[in-house]
């Protein structure tokens, strides 16, 4: 099958990675037990995107958070649940590993980008 857009075929071949959300920090957008698909690479991260990242001060911890702003070569991240501050307010700048593109379990759907 051919394509009129050379970059489109490469974009479609990029792998998606499944990630399980744990904890309440992204509620109500994502809840504990939700499974999401993450695309490494692709378009650049923008403020408001939900991402999978690693805090520089906690490299063993993979997190799902919302990108707020680029900072110091990485990203400042916040959870959607304002009652929980286990994000850049506690751990500083993070390095993004990929962008969450969809939730596939238990409620399939697009993960909304939020204007920040």
Image (cartoon, rainbow, N blue to C red):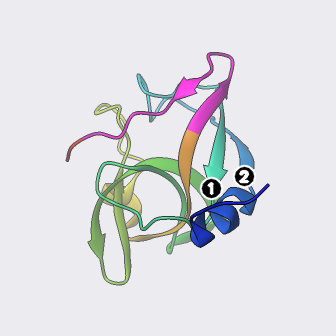
Q: Position of residue 34 (x, y in %)?
A: 64, 27
Q: Residue at x 50, y 28 (%)?
A: 30
SS for callout 1: strand
Q: Residue at x 45, y 48 (%)?
A: 65
Disc 1 packing (10 Å; few <14; some 14–19; many ≥20): some
Mark identifier at residue 16: 2
Q: Position of residue 88 (x, y in %)?
A: 35, 59
Could you tell me if the residues under marks 1 and 2 are in contact, i.e. CB atoms within 8 Å?
yes
Q: Is 108 included in the stretch rendered in magenta? A: yes
> Would you say 49 lies left or right of 68 here?
right
Q: Residue furthest top?
A: 107
Quarter of the image where the N terminus is located:
bottom right
Q: Position of residue 95 (x, y in %)?
A: 49, 72
Q: Residue furthest bottom?
A: 73
The residue closer to the viewer here, 61 or 95, is: 95
Q: Is residue 63 above or below residue 3?
A: above
Q: Position of residue 12 (x, y in %)?
A: 69, 56
Q: Residue at x 35, y 40 (%)?
A: 113
Q: Residue at x 20, y 47 (%)?
A: 116
Say which quarter of the image contains residue 71. bottom left
Say which quarter of the image contains residue 36. top right
Q: Which residues are magenta?
A: 102-114
Q: Residue furthest right?
A: 1
Q: Is residue 10 above or below residue 83?
A: below
> Circle 1 is placed at which residue position?
39
Of mark 1 and mark 2, the one earlier in the sequence is 2
The residue closer to the viewer here, 10 or 83, is: 10
SS for callout 2: loop
Mark identifier at residue 107: none
The residue closer to the viewer here, 103 or 32, is: 103
């Amino acid at each position: 099958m051919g394509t009129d857009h050379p970059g489109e075929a490469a974009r479609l071949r990029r792998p998606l990675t499944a990630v399980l959300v744990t904890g309440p920090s992204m509620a109500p957008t994502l809840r504990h037990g939700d499974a999401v698909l993450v695309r490494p690479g692709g378009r650049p991260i923008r403020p408001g995107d939900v991402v999978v990242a690693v805090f520089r001060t906690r490299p063993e911890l993979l997190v799902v958070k919302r990108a707020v702003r680029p900072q110091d070569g990485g990203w400042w991240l916040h959870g959607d649940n304002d009652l929980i501050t286990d994000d850049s307010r506690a751990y500083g700048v993070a390095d993004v590993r990929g962008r969450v593109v969809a939730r596939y379990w238990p409620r399939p759907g697009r993960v909304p980008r939020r204007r920040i």
